[in-house]
Image (cartoon, rainbow, N blue to C red):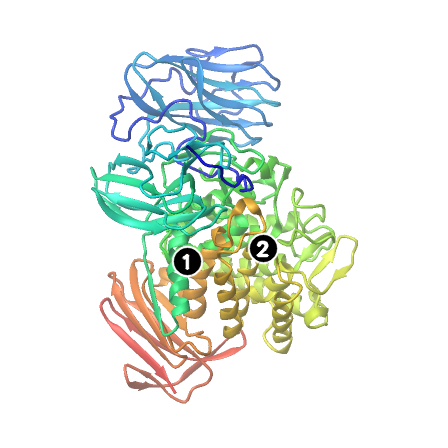
Amino acid sequence: MQPSRPLCLSLLASLAVLVPLTPLVATAPASAAASAAPTVTNPGFEQGATGWNFTSGTGIATNAPHGGTKLAYLDGGTGKKVSQTLTATGDGLYDFSAWVATGGTGGKFVARVNGTAVRTVALPSRNAYAKYTLPHVTLKNGDTLELAFESGNSWVNVDDVAATVAVPPPVDVANPDFEQGTTSWNFTSGTGIATNAPHGGTKLAYLDGGTGKKVSQTLTTTGDGLYDFSAWIATGGTGGKFVARVNGTVAGSVDLPSRSSYARYTVSRVSVKNGDTLELAFESGSGWINVDDLMVSPGAPVDPVVTSSDPKVVAMFDWAKRKANSWVQLPGAVGPLNIDENNRSGTGVGVYAPSYWAGYAHRSASYTRDLAHQVAGASVIGLHAENKSMLRAYAGSATAEHKYYPVWALNFDNQTYLKTDYISPTFFVREVPAAFELVEKANAAYRWSGDSAYVNDPEFWNYYKHATKEFIELHDAKKANGVAEGTGDGIFSGAVSYNETGEHHLIEAGDAIASQYQAFRAVAALATSKGDTALAAQFKQKADDLKTYYNDTWSGSGSGASMIRGYTREGGTLTGWGLENSWFVPMKQLIEPGSRAEAYLDFIDQQASGSGKPSNIEAISYLPDTFFAYDRNDTAWKWMKYVYDQRDVQHPVSKQGPNGDYPEVSYTLLSQTVEGLMGVQPDAPAKSLATGSRLPSGMGWLQVKDVKIGGNTFTLRHDGVTSSKLTNTAGSATYSWEARFPGNKSTIKVDGVPRTVKTKTINGKTYTYATVSVAPGQTATVTVS
């Protein structure tokens, strides 16, 4: 019998899982062979009304088809429906999709089996066509299936309906959120299903205290792979375990601490082969255990390893890479859409695309701001497919209808706008810095991956052009100076700063102008890679001009606390501490190096260390990047350690869990180790990389093994700031390595052989450097004195 347990646990909103939160049809076993997909009659409406049922207020039109010459339409208002009824001729699991455009909200795309709605997608307000999918609909021979499009508060256009055989992922955990009760799980005595304190939805699994109790699921895998298994767990004592067994042998386990509030635990990098028996088990300890919302992630493609004279950075990096990968969605998994703290059941389900969590863990979405800050860390562990899929989806959302703003949040299908942040094309959350950061981060993803899509795919290139031209022109009215503005009326009308807490009605802000500067630089770099030297020169000049304007005019003549960080819509200026609109300026290297920059960095560190410290850890996660940008290595390392040490502290948003379960924390610690401490600057398209030790005082040496840039894998070691060693461990390409060292040194040697001393100035700092070709299998060592 379930004992009493704390009723003060946070009732967290549901998380993305592998099946819908309240499915009405059980998912077919992954091994089940589906018959051919049902045939949809007249799927493109090219035969008019043939095969379809139309109520009053619906019909066939020719004015705006998605494909061909015709489409179906529904007028606005309740009670209108276009539908088709089919009879299944075999057993199987199927996906049904359609291209839909809408003039308002409230419409639905529904699948009903034998009269019961089993899958529903709520249609947003979106004038442009988008593909919506009803995934993994289970049919038995003879079942009646109705596919229906139902009206909302405005017109709905429908075209190109399709049916395909669904392919579940190789590891398909059934009922991962326990919303179907005990279905697919095994419960010993002293365990069961409860409703008093779920993490998400309405149910959870529990284990009473004492030995020998277990909740487990056993499944057969249908492919080879490496996977992470995560679950939200709360405990009343120690001794419990979360275990994965493959063919009866423990493949990984986590010892559960005593923590009465939910936190996320992961069994990492479990290897399975097709046909293996996989058991996922939660085993009892000295106190009660509550379990909810199991998630499967594909193992990270890259598994870099850090070693160092400082054990702190080793533990930090190992924790961060495991935690970061636990947020990666399994492509092809079916999960809920539009989950948030006020909508615990969402608005249906979708097929998840390559993506990862970037934002609150109690919402079924990624966010532009978080994604921008996580791209580099994701690149460190090889999440190139996820970066490209997510960045491209946001690029595609920046339409003329949206005045070239990308949407603020996308569900994990990388298609559906998160409902809580998107009401209509004219009323959705949007912030100016994000439009520019996505350009900068697409370039960063290109440098890590070498994927030519970033320069050849029109979806990306159109975004770069619109973000750095039309977007600025459309949002430069009140203070016409070539700097993009917000409205000063809040996040749903276009905020100019990531700092949403300020009471001032800002129209220009430090974080926006700094992000615009880096977007210009990114377009210059992308244009160079594309071979467009004229465009590259144009945008390099635009970046240089903007930096001059900022330093000579925009920021005023003050220093530190007196430097201007924003302009109000009433024409006033703001100085002092502005959180993001303060620290983004040096982080993006917009402020000229020198005494003014150093004073501003001192001011930022002073404020963040005192009464101005942000309450949310994700804001503090920017500070290491800020100080690394000006080689303030000891300060950057101080803030890295602070962020890591706060990982078990409860986040101020109770539904989020501990700080360490905010995804931005782990991803930024990865990039801050490799790009920050190690100073790695990848350029996979050019088959090159630059490095420069930023080891803080007291850290004797640091090495990262198996870091991948493009198609090659490297091991890099720094001994202090005077010796660097690079090994090209795998891959077919020879890379050019620029080994940099701070200061103007008298000697430089490559593999013990003296070279002519060369220096360069980067952001106001002098570096001594040597350029070395490192072929596959070779090691080069560069030293200075």
Residue 578: image location, x then y, percent: 67, 60
Q: Residue at x 54, y 69 (%)?
A: 627
Q: Quadrant of residue 166?
A: top left
Q: Nearer the viewer, residue 150 or 28?
A: 28
- Residue beneath disc 2: 616
Q: Can the viewer see residue 628 in this picture?
A: no
- Local packing at callout 1 (Cα closer than 10 Å; few below 14, some 14-19, many 20+) is many
Q: Residue at x 44, y 78 (%)?
A: 698
How many dots with numbers?
A: 2
Q: Can the viewer see residue 311 in this picture?
A: yes
Instruction: Tell me the number on the disc at residue 170.
Output: none
- Considering the numbered disc 2 on the image, is that residue within a helix, a strand or a loop? loop
- Local packing at callout 2 (Cα closer than 10 Å; few below 14, some 14-19, many 20+) is few
- Considering the numbered disc 1 on the image, is that residue within a helix, a strand or a loop? helix
Say which quadrant the N terminus sits in.
Answer: top left
- Residue beneath disc 1: 320
Residue 473: image location, x then y, percent: 64, 50
Q: Quadrant of residue 565?
A: bottom right
Q: Is residue 305 above or below residue 3?
A: below
